[in-house]
Image: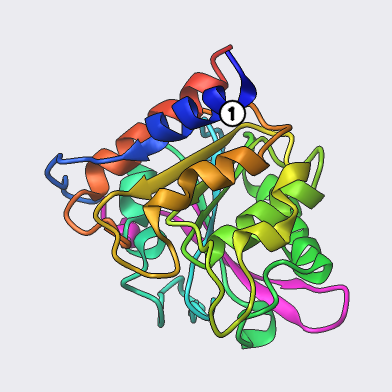
């Protein structure tokens, strides 16, 4: 089978249409929350929230969309982007047994236009180093919407630190920040990658039909509605199963 045919088949298989009803999320407030301000190379810091067990099947580093300003409080509360897919479902990921790491933006500034840069890849790497002091497990970058540009960037540049990457509702079309997942050198990603697209997504920046284009760029990676409202449980279960399957071999 040609590579183009293989890419098309794999991409089609990874475009999810999930009709499962949402399960009750574990209350994130009941999980142990550790908040740390991690120093950055250029000065200042980024706030990082860790929650979960010390020996999880994987440590999931959540990279939200929007402007990236999460507003993590001293007690682990979330002040902004509370409706973001990865932020609002953190209890579901914890219920799967994973450790969850949420990154706030460096120095509380907007990440728009910055997610594809080397400086931000370094910021992700520093958060990864912190996460390894709290738990023992493979690190996966999970991005949604604009956060997929950050996840792809980290997976491409942090070789040896990242076990895999999950891209959900990837930004593939230009918008005000003038960056897309393609600016993050996805062709350099050599870890397992999963592309998740919602066939009901009507956001003009994240068309699900572009999922095969992302797959076509992932030449070195072994492949396997916008916010997933109402289908969170099914999407998370399928991603969780795939991450576990990768590490079972």
Mark 1 lies on residue = 4
Residue 130 appears anywhere in the view: no
Using the image, determine if residue 14 lies above or below residue 149: above
Where residue 78 sits, quadrant-wise, is bottom left
Where is residue 236 shown, x and y percent of the image? Answer: 33, 42
Range of the magenta residues?
A: 26-51
Q: Nearer the viewer, residue 117 or 71?
A: 117
Give the quadrant of the C terminus: top right
**Was residue 199 drawn as part of the magenta stretch in this picture?**
no
Using the image, determine if residue 208 lies above or below residue 137: below
**Was residue 31 drawn as part of the magenta stretch in this picture?**
yes
Please report the residue visible at 57 percent of the width from the left and 21 percent of the height from the top: 247
Using the image, determine if residue 119 lies above or below residue 111: above
Where residue 120 sits, quadrant-wise, is bottom right
As helix, strand or loop, the secondary structure at mark 1 comes to: helix
Where is residue 79 shown, x and y percent of the image? Answer: 40, 82
Where is residue 170 shown, x and y percent of the image? Answer: 49, 57
Mark 1 crowdedness (10 Å alpha carbons): few <14, some 14-19, many ≥20:
few
Task: Residue lying at the far left in this picture: please name it.
Answer: 21
Where is residue 128 shown, x and y percent of the image? Answer: 70, 52
Residue 111 as seen in the image, left or right of residue 119: left
Q: Nearer the viewer, residue 107 or 245?
A: 245
Please report the residue visible at 50 percent of the width from the left and 41 percent of the height from the top: 212
Residue 84 appears anywhere in the view: yes
Please report the residue visible at 53 percent of the width from the left and 24 percent of the height from the top: 5
Please report the residue visible at 46 percent of the width from the left and 64 percent of the height from the top: 145
């Amino acid at each position: 089978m040609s590579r183009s045919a293989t890419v098309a088949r794999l991409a089609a298989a990874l475009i999810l249409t999930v009709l499962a009803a949402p399960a009750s999320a574990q209350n994130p407030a009941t999980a142990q929350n550790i908040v740390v301000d991690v120093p950055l190379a250029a000065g200042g810091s980024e706030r990082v929230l860790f929650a979960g067990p010390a020996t999880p099947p994987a440590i999931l580093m959540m990279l939200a969309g929007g402007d990236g300003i999460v507003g993590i409080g001293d007690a682990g509360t979330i002040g902004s982007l509370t409706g973001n897919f990865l932020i609002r479902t953190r209890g579901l990921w914890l219920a799967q047994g994973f450790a969850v790491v949420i990154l706030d933006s460096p120095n509380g500034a907007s990440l728009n236009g910055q997610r594809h840069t080397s400086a931000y890849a370094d910021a992700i790497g520093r958060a990864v180093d912190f996460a390894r002091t709290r738990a023992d497990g493979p690190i996966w970058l999970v991005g949604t919407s604009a956060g997929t540009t950050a996840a792809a960037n980290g997976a491409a540049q942090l070789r040896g630190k990242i076990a895999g990457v999950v891209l959900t509702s990837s930004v593939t079309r230009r918008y005000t920040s003038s960056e897309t997942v393609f600016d993050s050198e996805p062709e350099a990603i050599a870890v397992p990658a999963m592309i998740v697209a919602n066939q009901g997504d009507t956001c003009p920046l994240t068309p699900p039909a572009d999922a095969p284009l992302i797959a076509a760029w992932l030449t070195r990676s072994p492949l396997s509605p916008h916010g997933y409202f109402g289908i969170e449980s099914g999407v998370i279960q399928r991603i969780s199963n795939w991450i576990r399957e990768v590490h079972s071999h």
